[in-house]
Image (tube, grey):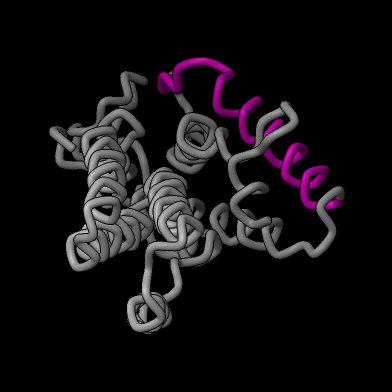
Amino acid sequence: PDNGSFFGVVAPSLSTIRETSEVLCARAMLRAGQGDFDGFLADTITVKRLARHMTTNSGIGLASGLGMDRRADRAIAVVAAHGQLTAAQCAALARTLKAFPKIASAREVVDIHDRWALLDAVAQTAVGRANIALGIDRDAVDWDVILKRMNTSVNEELRIMALPDTVARNTAGRAWNRAVTAAGHAGKPTKQSGETREHYTLRVAETLEGRLLSDAYGEGDVQRLDWLVE
């Protein structure tokens, strides 16, 4: 992203590559219809490679990458169902698909990529480079404490994601989300006269958690983490 922060990766910034995957899949089917198996294979494989690159940068990237991979699978299914591929071509296609690595799991993305994006956002805030207008007195904050707290928050997110029961996962996730959101939107963390460094650091940590983590579980029927886990 333009601001140099991992946390700035948002859905609109990925739209160009998603549109590219749509065009490649359309061209793949046209090539197959013209008897150009190599061209068809090259286009669909390119989309699946792009999808795997996308899934390694963030939760949003994972969602986009999964969509791209499904788009390539649909194009392959349409061509296969049309009955034009020879036995040799089907075998070559099967070998190519079998050789592809698995897409990263949601837990892997949260544990590594989302964790580091979050920590990067905190680091950017600490030096005044983040686009978070909170009026924080940066010199009065113990940023090491906040970084450790964010790590703990991600660990809790992963614990919730690991719950085997969907209802229990949603219940725990929503409760966690409500607590984080409430603390994060209590107002700008302006340092009060006489407030200790420890207390002010805690208030800033709660605010940043609410601003940066509260989208993990919403109150609607579909939660970001839940459908990725499923």
Residue 24, image x, y percentages: 24, 47
User: Which quarter of the picture shows residue 2?
Assistant: top left
Viewport quadrant of the N terminus = top left
Q: Is residue 32 magenta?
A: no
Q: Which residues are magenta?
A: 168-192
**Is residue 8 in sight in this rendering?**
no
The quarter of the rendered structure image containing the C terminus is bottom right
Q: Residue 125 placed where, x, y %?
A: 28, 36
* Residue located 58% across and 18% down the image: 186
x, y percentage for residue 132? 32, 25
Residue 147 appears left or right of 12: right
Q: Is residue 212 above or below residue 220?
A: below
Task: Tell me how many marks there are.
Answer: 0
Q: Residue at x 19, y 61 (%)?
A: 36
From the viewer's perspective, is residue 123 above or below residue 80?
above
Dominant SS in magenta: helix
Residue displayed at 23% across by 59% down? 35
The answer to whether residue 180 is visible is yes
| Relative horizontal placement of residue 224, taking residue 188 as reference (left or right) | right
Q: Quadrant of the rendered structure where residue 116 is? A: bottom left
Residue placed most toward the observer, 36 or 59: 36
The residue under the point 37% across, 48% down is 61
In this picture, residue 20 sits left or right of residue 135 = left
Frontmost residue, 219 versus 78: 78
Q: Position of residue 73 (x, y in %)?
A: 45, 57
